[in-house]
Image (tube, grey):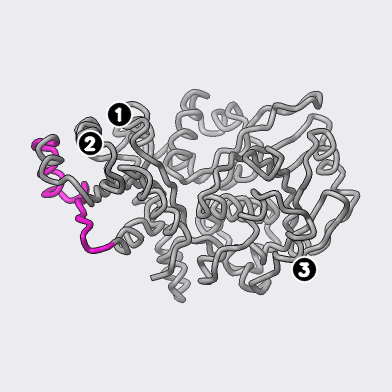
C-alpha cells in the first residue's frame, strides 16, 4: 500500500466532527485508505446488495443499532440514509468521529450535505496519487510555508528538489491512478485506462444520470482532451458535437463533479480592463489525458502540440492536491486579459498577510524575465507579497523582489 498524505488530515477531521464525507474519483484509493482505520470501524458498501438492503430497509433503525465507527461506502447510492444520519448525529451531537461516508461521484453527496447535514459534517476530497505520493516521499515543506508569514529567503532555503527530472517526467506521462502506476506492464496500463472510461460511463454516470446519451457523452469526454488547458467556449463545443449549449454546460457539470475534469473559473475581481471571463479547465489525470490523445511514450509527449497544456495541468493538479492533503483550503482561478496578459493560476486563500498567490507555470528550465511581465504586473496591481514560477530548473531561484522560481521536483 502506498502511504497517502491525506491520512493525517482525515484523522484530524474525525477528531473534530461527528461525520466526515470522503469524496474522490473512482479508483483513486479511497477504499484502501479506509482500510487503514482501526479494526473497530465497521464498513457497509452500498454497491453490495445485502448491505444496501440492510440499511435501506429501515435507515432510522440501522443508525440506532449502529451508533459509532461506521463507514458507509458509495453513500450516494443510498440517498435515504442522509436524513436518518442527521437524526442519529443529533442524538449525541458532542461525540466526534462516529461516521464516515465515502463516494466516487459527488453530485448527490454535494446536494445532501447542505440540505441534511449542514454543520454536522466535514468534507474531504481525495485524488489519485500526487507527485510525492507516487514516489513515496514525505509531503513538501512548500505548502505550509506558503500559508505562514514566511519570507522569500526562508522559503528558498527550505524548499529543495527531492526528485530527479526523470521521476517528474515519468509521473507526468503516466498519471497518478494507483493501480496503473504500480504496474510495470505498459499493455496493462493501456487496457486499464480503456476500461476505466467504460466503467466511469456505465457505473458512475449511468447510475446517476440514467437519461444521459452515453454515446454523445463519450464523444464529449474524448473532446475534453483537446480542450484541456484551454479557455472553454461552450458554444464552440456545442457546434462540434451537434448539441445545445445547456447540454454542454450540464456535461461539464457532470465531468467536474465526478472529479474527471477540473473547472478553473476566471479571476474577474481585478481593476484591469477587459478581463476575459470564460473559464478554462483540465482533465485531472495526465495518464487519462495522454490515453485519450493517443500519446504512446515520453518522446511523443515532448513533441505533441498539447505538451505545454499537459505540463500545466499536471502542475496545477499537483499544487491543488498538495494543499488539499495538507488540509489547506484554496480556490483556483486563471487570469487573462483581452490584451494578452495571462497568469496561469491564481490561488485564493490565506497566504500569510495576503489572500492571493499568483503562479506561472513553465515547461522550460529557465524563465525569461521578459515573459514574466504579466506575473509582475498582477503582483503589483494586487499588492501580492509573493508570486511563484513552477519550472524544470535544478534549484530554487529568486527572480526579482517578489517572484520565486521553484522546480517541479520540489513539489
- Determine the residue positioned at 66% across, 50% down: 148
State yes or no: discs 1 and 3 in contact (Cβ < 8 Å): no
The spot of residue 311 in percent (x, y) is 66, 56
- Determine the residue positioned at 9% across, 37% down: 61
* Along the line of sight, the residue nearer the viewer: 122 or 104: 122
Q: Secondary structure at mark 1?
A: helix
Check if residue 62 falls in the magenta segment.
no
Spatial CA distance of label 2 from label 1 is 8 Å
Q: Tag 1 or tag 2, which sits nearer the N-term?
A: 2
Quadrant of the rendered image containing residue 362: bottom right
Residue at the extreme bottom of the image, as rendered: 184
Q: Tag 3 or tag 1, which sits nearer the N-term?
A: 1
- How many neighbours does mark 2 have within 10 angstroms: few (below 14), some (14-19), or many (20 or more)? many
Q: Secondary structure at mark 3?
A: loop
Query: Where 265 falls versus 148 (above or below)?
Result: above
- Determine the residue positioned at 71% across, 39% down: 354
State yes or no: discs 2 and 1 in contact (Cβ < 8 Å): yes
Q: Which mark identifies residue 85?
A: 2
Q: Quadrant of the C terminus?
A: bottom right
Spatial CA distance of label 1 from label 3 is 49 Å
Quadrant of the rendered image containing residue 187: bottom left
State yes or no: discs 3 and 2 in contact (Cβ < 8 Å): no
Which residue in the protein does label 3 denote?
395
Q: Point out the stretch of residues depicted in magenta.
A: 38-59
Residue at the extreme right of the image, as rendered: 370
The spot of residue 302 in percent (x, y) is 69, 63
Q: Tag 2 or tag 3, which sits nearer the N-term?
A: 2
- How many neighbours does mark 1 have within 10 angstroms: few (below 14), some (14-19), or many (20 or more)? some
Q: Would residue 151 appear left or right of 187 to someone viewing this image?
A: right
Q: Which mark identifies residue 116?
A: 1
Amino acid at each position: 500500500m502506498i502511504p497517502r498524505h491525506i491520512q493525517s488530515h482525515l484523522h484530524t477531521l474525525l477528531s473534530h466532527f461527528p461525520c466526515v464525507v470522503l469524496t474522490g474519483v473512482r479508483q483513486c484509493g479511497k477504499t484502501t485508505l479506509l482500510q487503514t482505520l482501526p479494526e473497530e470501524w465497521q464498513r457497509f458498501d452500498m454497491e453490495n446488495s445485502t448491505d444496501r438492503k440492510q440499511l435501506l430497509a429501515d435507515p432510522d433503525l440501522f443508525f440506532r443499532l449502529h451508533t459509532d465507527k461506521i463507514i458507509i461506502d458509495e453513500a450516494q447510492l443510498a440517498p435515504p440514509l442522509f436524513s436518518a444520519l442527521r437524526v442519529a448525529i443529533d442524538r449525541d451531537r458532542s461525540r466526534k468521529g462516529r461516521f464516515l461516508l465515502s463516494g466516487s461521484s459527488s453530485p448527490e453527496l454535494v446536494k445532501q450535505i447542505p440540505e441534511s447535514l449542514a454543520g454536522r459534517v466535514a468534507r474531504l476530497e481525495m485524488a489519485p496519487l500526487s507527485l510525492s505520493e507516487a514516489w513515496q516521499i514525505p509531503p513538501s515543506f512548500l505548502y505550509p510555508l506558503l500559508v505562514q508569514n514566511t519570507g522569500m529567503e526562508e522559503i528558498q532555503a527550505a524548499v529543495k528538489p527531492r526528485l530527479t527530472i526523470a521521476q517528474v517526467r515519468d509521473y507526468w506521462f503516466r498519471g497518478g491512478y494507483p493501480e496503473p502506476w504500480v504496474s510495470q506492464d505498459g499493455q496493462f496500463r493501456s487496457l486499464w485506462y480503456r476500461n476505466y472510461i467504460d466503467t466511469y460511463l456505465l457505473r458512475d454516470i449511468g447510475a446517476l444520470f440514467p437519461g444521459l446519451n452515453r454515446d454523445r457523452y463519450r464523444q464529449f469526454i474524448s473532446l475534453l482532451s483537446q480542450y484541456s488547458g484551454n479557455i472553454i467556449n461552450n458554444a464552440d463545443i456545442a457546434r462540434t458535437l451537434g448539441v445545445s449549449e445547456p447540454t454542454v454546460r450540464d456535461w461539464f457539470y457532470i465531468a467536474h463533479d465526478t472529479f474527471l475534469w477540473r473547472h478553473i473559473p476566471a479571476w474577474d475581481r481585478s481593476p484591469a480592463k477587459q478581463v476575459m471571463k470564460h473559464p478554462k479547465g483540465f482533465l485531472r489525470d495526465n495518464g487519462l489525458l495522454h490515453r485519450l490523445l493517443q500519446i504512446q511514450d515520453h518522446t511523443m509527449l515532448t513533441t505533441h502540440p498539447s505538451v505545454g497544456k499537459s505540463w500545466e495541468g499536471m502542475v496545477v493538479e499537483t499544487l491543488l492536491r498538495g494543499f488539499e492533503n495538507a488540509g489547506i483550503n484554496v480556490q483556483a482561478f486563471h487570469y487573462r486579459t483581452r490584451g494578452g496578459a495571462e497568469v496561469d493560476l491564481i490561488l485564493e486563500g490565506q497566504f500569510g498577510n495576503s489572500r492571493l498567490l499568483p503562479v506561472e507555470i513553465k515547461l522550460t528550465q529557465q524563465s525569461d524575465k521578459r515573459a514574466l511581465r504579466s506575473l509582475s504586473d498582477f503582483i503589483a496591481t494586487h499588492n501580492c507579497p509573493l508570486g511563484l514560477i513552477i519550472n524544470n530548473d535544478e534549484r530554487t531561484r529568486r527572480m526579482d523582489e517578489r517572484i520565486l522560481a521553484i522546480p517541479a521536483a520540489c513539489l
